[in-house]
Amino acid sequence: MQLSKPLYESLPGLYVLGGALLIAVSHQLHSGALSVLLLIAGMLAVIGGAAIWLRRRDFRATRAEYWANAGPSSVDGDGPPADPGADRAADALRRPEEP
């Protein structure tokens, strides 16, 4: 299933908002079991939304730092080789010398 980019980017915020709403409803209810279940669900939603947001932020920062410093690796052959000597060593391992 593919989500549109605006919807995908807003999911952590929606989780936090939904969790906060569940916590508020649980506070308004005075029924013991239902109130506790809503509180637990709300806290899980808030924590989950925050965790997803933090993971995305860290991944994007790490990816941007990687691309800014090292560039793409030449393992896939997509970019320029980072170290030409490494390519020669890899070729030597793939093709053993003949006697």
Image (tube, grey):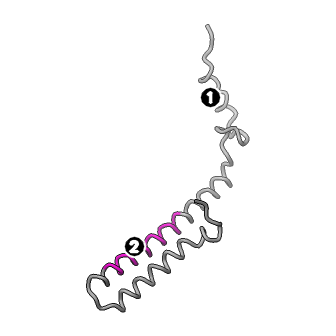
Circle 2 Cα neighbour tier, 10 Å, few/some/many (<14 / 14–19 / ≥20): some
Query: In terms of image quadrants, where is residue 76?
Result: top right
User: Which is more foreground, mark 1 or mark 2?
Assistant: 2
- Say what secondary structure mark 1 lies in: helix
As drawn, the residue found furthest toward the right would be 80
Sequence-first disc among 1 and 2:
2
The structure residue drawn at horizontal position 65% and vertical position 71%, both measured from the top left corner, is 6
Q: Nearer the viewer, residue 7 or 79?
A: 7
Secondary structure, mark 2, is helix
Mark 1: which amino acid? Ala
- The reply to whether dot 1 and dot 2 touch (C-beta < 8 Å) is no
Q: Residue furthest left?
A: 32
Q: Position of residue 21 (x, y in %)?
A: 45, 84
Identify residue for label 1.
90
State left or right for residue 86 relative to residue 37.
right
Above or below for 53 versus 27: above
- Magenta highlight range: 37-55
Asked if residue 58 lies left or right of residue 78, the reply is left
As drawn, is 91 to the left or to the right of 38?
right
Report how far apart the C-alphas of labels 1 and 2 lie in the structure.
48 Å
Q: Residue at x 59, y 73 (%)?
A: 10
Queried whether the magenta region covers residue 43, the answer comes back as yes
Q: Position of residue 8 (x, y in %)?
A: 60, 67
Amino acid type, callout 2: Leu
Q: Nearer the viewer, residue 90 or 39?
A: 39
Q: Which residue is mark 2?
A: 44
Q: Quadrant of the C terminus?
A: top right
